[in-house]
Each structure stands twice: as C-alpha cells, then as structure tokens.
Image: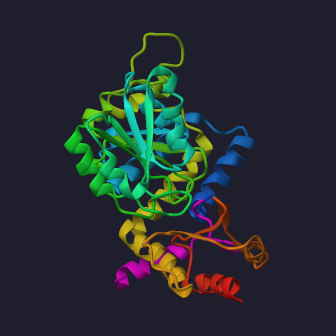
Amino acid sequence: MHNTGRDRLRSAQNRFSPETTYLDTATHGLPPRTALLELERHLRSVGAGRFSPAEADPGIAAARGAYARLTGVPAERVAIGSHASQFAGTIAASLPPGSEVLTAVREFSSVVHPFLAREPHGVRVREAPLDRLADEVGPGTDLVAVSAVQSSDGAVAPVEELLEACAHHGARLMLDTTQAGWLPLPLERVDYTVSSTYKWLLGPRGSAFLTATEEALAALDPLAANWYAAAEPWNSLYGGPLELAEGARRLDLAPVWFSWIGLAPALELVEEVGLETIREHDAGLGDRLLTALDLPPAGSAIVSLAVSEDLSRKVAEAGIAASTRAGRLRVSFHLYNTEEEVDRLVKVLTS
C-alpha cells in the first residue's frame, strides 16, 4: 500500500469508536462518527417534531451518486430499496416459465430464496459448487445468481469467468455484492447487482441498491410501484395515473429515512479511502490471520475457521466480536481493523 493510501486509511480509522475488538463486519459494519452524528441529528429532529420528509431527498441523491461512483455504474441505472432480497425478487419475477437459474451450493438465502419461490411458476433452480459455477453455465441457463463473496466463508466468485460464460451462452449474471464492499469489481459489465449496505458500506440496516445494464434493466418491471418511484414523487401521493420515473428510478422503493440519512456520510468515507486501498488492507488482514495459523492465504476479508465451541467461547470472552456460521468461526476485517487486532485473535486461538 502506497503512502497516500496508508494516510487515507489512518485518517479513516480515527473516525470510528469501537469498544471491542470488532472482527464482525460480515454481520454488520461499524458506522463512522460522521454517520452517527447525522443519525442523532435526525432522531432529535423527529422527536422534536421538526423533521420534514423532503429534507431526506438530498441525502438520498448523494448516496445514490456516491454508490454510482464507487461501482462505475451511471446513477440513472441505480435503484434504491431496503434489502437486497427485494431486488432479487424483482429480478426473479421477470423470468418467464421454463427459465433456469444457476446458483452456488449453500448460497446465502437472500440470493437463492427469491428464485426458489418462483418454482411454482415454472422457474428451475440448479446448484453447482462455486469453483465450478462458470463451467456449469450452459445453453439452457437463463440467469446465474450468486454472491460475489460468500457469506459463510469469504470465498470469492470467479466473476470474470462467469461474465465470459454468460456472454457465450446468452445468460444474464446477477451478483449480490453485500459481502463484497471491500472488493473492486467490474460491476458496470454485470447485468444485475444487488447490495445491502449495512456491512462493508457501513450504513444502517434498511438501505440497499440495485444496478443493471441498460438491456437488463429494460427487462424489469416494478413489483411494488410506489410514490417514490414516480417521475414527480411529491406530486404522486394519491391516485393515478401511474407515471413512473425513467431508468432505474422506476424501481425505487420508498426509503427508510433513518437508513439513508446515515448512509451518505458512510459512503463518502469509503469513497475517500478508495476500494483498492480497502481491498489491500482488508484482505491483507485476512491473509495475516491465515498465515499465522499455518493456513494458505485466500485473499478475502472474510475468514472461516474450524474451531471448537470452547475456543469460540474463549474468543468472545477475550472481548473479540466474531460470528459462528455453518458451524465454523467466521471473522471479518474492514478498514477500522489493525494488525494488532489480528495478532490478539491469533494469541487466543493458539494459547
């Protein structure tokens, strides 16, 4: 990491206030103090009866713009919602009967369940191991739906191979990037991406994005058309006609104001540090842990370890926040974590 990147990282680390050794961003990211201050201001305004919903619109526009810059997708092809599964459901509903959806074995439920729910309508879901997913794309595949980074163990999807295989067979690709906010990806080339922002993008729970290519976006219809998806939201609160916005905004879901007010400052911090600097730092900490435990590096910010329940309990008793997923200890690193925190975990695991 070059000096400028290290300087930005150190500056960013000073904007968080963890009271534990927090190694659990894969469950929920820590909001920076700038976001907390905005949330506190908002709650005070609501409690005092001074909040006007239209006041949230500039922050939502700022968050949409920041996400567009982070992903390289134009803002007019970015839709806002509350959860990634809502947008996955919109994509699932666009598939005609007889469509085949290919997904990874043990994929996170918010990715696969929206498509399984369409099986009574003639959609077929087929699973394959993540490392063979690109090879399993065939002429009968209509959509590949997969997490860019697996929630359970941090495995990174072969995105370039999937893009090539989908292009060859005429299939579309949907990536859930919820666990990949630390990883630069060619999202402008991916047909659909969905992302909840409360993990690596450091926002409150209740905000999510969808992006799409122009061609793929045209295939989607709003499942929950609402006033916020209208061309003129504040003039579309009652009755018809239905006059939806252009582009991805026609898929917008009415915002959870609390979540969006806290998101814009968090995204601005991620943008300030830069995804490449974050990737190098986050994945570097993951590999530092694996190397210290005599395990091969994986290049991921999420590490899954086979440890006993007793050892997992000792990790928690040491004041280290982590998770248990799929029967294994899952730890995850982000820009506010340090090498000293990795070493602290190693000491507990090897004592």
Magenta region, residue range: 1-26
Residue 262 in view: yes
Where does the image place residue 52, in percent across and percent down from the top left?
60, 35
Residue 19 in view: no
Q: Residue at x 41, y 66 (%)?
A: 272
Q: Nearer the viewer, residue 34 or 165?
A: 165
Q: Residue furthest left?
A: 168
The N terminus sits in image quarter: bottom left
Q: Residue furthest top?
A: 240
Is the residue 330 above or below the residue 350 in the image?
above
Residue 9 magenta-drawn?
yes
Q: Residue at x 42, y 81 (%)?
A: 7
Where does the image place residue 294, in percent across and percent down from the top left?
53, 86
Is the residue 41 above or below the residue 61 in the image?
below
Q: Give the quadrant of residue 292.
A: bottom right
Where does the image place residue 166, in percent across and percent down from the top left?
26, 44
Where does the image place residue 38, in percent across and percent down from the top left?
60, 54
Is the residue 179 above or below the residue 115 in the image?
below
The C terminus sits in image quarter: bottom right
Q: Residue at x 59, y 61 (%)?
A: 29
